[in-house]
Image (spheres, rainbow, N blue to C red):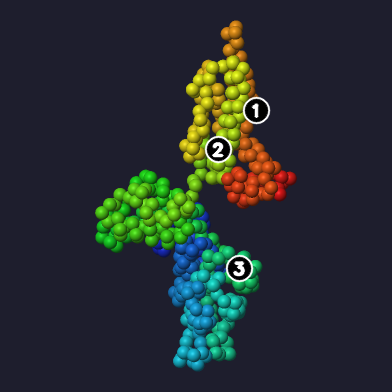
Amino acid sequence: MTESELQEQKAKFGIIGNDPKLNRAIEVAFQVAPTDLSVLVTGESGVGKEFFPKIIHNNSARKHGPYIAVNCGAIPEGTVDSELFGHEKGAFTGAISERKGYFEVADGGTIFLDEVGELPLTTQVRLLRVLEVGEFSRVGSSKVLKTNVRVVAATNLKMQEAVEKGTFREDLYYRLNTIQISVPSLRERHDDIYLLFRKFASDFAEKYHTDPVRLDEEAVVCLKQYNWSGNVRQIRNVTNQISLLESENKKITKDVLLNYLPDFEKNSIRHELTIGSKDNVFNSGERELLYSAVHSLRQEVEYLKGIVERRGDIVPTTQQIQPATKINTLPLPHSTPAIEEDEDIFFEDEDSVQHTQKKTNKNDVTEIVEVNTSSLSIDEAIRKLTIKALETCPNNRKAAEALGINERTLYRYIEKYDLGKYKK
């Protein structure tokens, strides 16, 4: 798929964003469109799964045939078979005439089964038969009817778990999942968040005949930090509310934006921290461990400094050791500072720490007394802290709590640093 074809599909169906995962999902839909294979579109609620069956249908040989979208989760269980496959007159109370179902109406075209995981098991059996041999029967009839329909299904459920629980047939799952398209969540499309806000702000400004709302720099950062559990649907609704209610103030500050982001502190993403260079990036759990390691090293330096001071070898200066500040403002090294006469601690480089103390003897001969010459890299610091937690705590859950990380991150460290023998 060429870049021009990709942009054409986005423009045609109103898809906003340039994230590589989103682009890949569009490419797969475009590539599979000319075939008649069944497709399963997966992703969280609100990510825009409904665009992909349209891309598939409009780029297939069936594009001149009917396209029917069915929300399986919105149909009552007692009538879903009638809706999908039709019924005969008198088949049940209220069936005053025969009715064609969606599979009969969509013959020669495409049917999109949204929230397919919500179908009852009895309906799943009927659907499997349609997929395998293209046959079905209306409710209340034994007559076998034929249909030629391309099926594209979508779900926000974890289908493997549904199969294991017995709520979804395994054979139907594999029949639907001939090709799978995974649509990324908005959290995975970090750079698209502000782009979507601007597009929706422009759309609502046109709708309400006003100027589009704009965010200041702090508000943009806040917008990108939010978790957006409702994905594109949620950011569209928030933009709509702001556009409508902030009619007199089009420059939105962080404080104003927070009024529209429920439980921001609980639902904000802790961004990665870059230390020294763009290639040295840590997630929130690793960052906390790094801070702990630095804090531990500072404590060791203070202890050793105290020993030297008690010997009367030095006169402490205010420049020697800086007190640890809050985590989010803890100064971290970006380059090696110049070492002065009485300077006590310095970072040798971005990955190691070394402590030295200058000592002047009575003959004015200056010599370097190395208090701790072994450098401790960030990986080594994290490994050391992880081992200590695993050895000290009664189980892995307690160890993770002690480190301030979740168990999944702890298991990743156990595997990364080959700490299997410490695992409990």
Reading the image, the residue beneath label 3 is: 162
Which residue sits furthest top? 363
- Give the mark nearer the N terminus: 3 vs 1: 3
Which residue sits furthest right? 421
Secondary element at tag 2: helix
Query: Residue 237 in the image: x percent, y percent?
Result: 38, 61
Reading the image, the residue beneath label 2 is: 291
Q: Residues within 10 Å of mark 3 (few under 14, many from 20)?
A: some
Residue type of the residue flagged with mark 2: Tyr
Query: Residue 385 in the image: x percent, y percent?
Result: 64, 39
Residue 169 is drawn in which quadrant? Answer: bottom right
Up-down: is 333 above or below 36? above
Which residue sits furthest front? 310
Mark 2 vs 3: CB contact within 8 A: no
Secondary element at tag 3: helix
Quick one: 144 or 351, which is closer to the camera?
A: 351
Q: Which is closer to the viewer, label 1 or label 2?
A: 2
Mark 1 vs 2: CB contact within 8 A: no
Query: Residue 380 in the image: x percent, y percent?
Result: 64, 36
Residue drawn at the location 45% of the way across and 65% of the way down: 51
Instruction: Kindly identify which numbered label has been placed on residue 374.
Output: 1
Residue drawn at the location 38% of the way across and 58% of the way down: 238
Instruction: Kindly identify which numbered label has been placed on residue 88.
Output: none
- Residue 354 appears in the rendering: no
Rounded to the nearest whole Å, what is the CA distance between mark 1 and mark 2? 19 Å
Residue drawn at the location 30% of the way across and 55% of the way down: 246
Residue type of the residue flagged with mark 1: Ser
Residue type of the residue flagged with mark 3: Ala
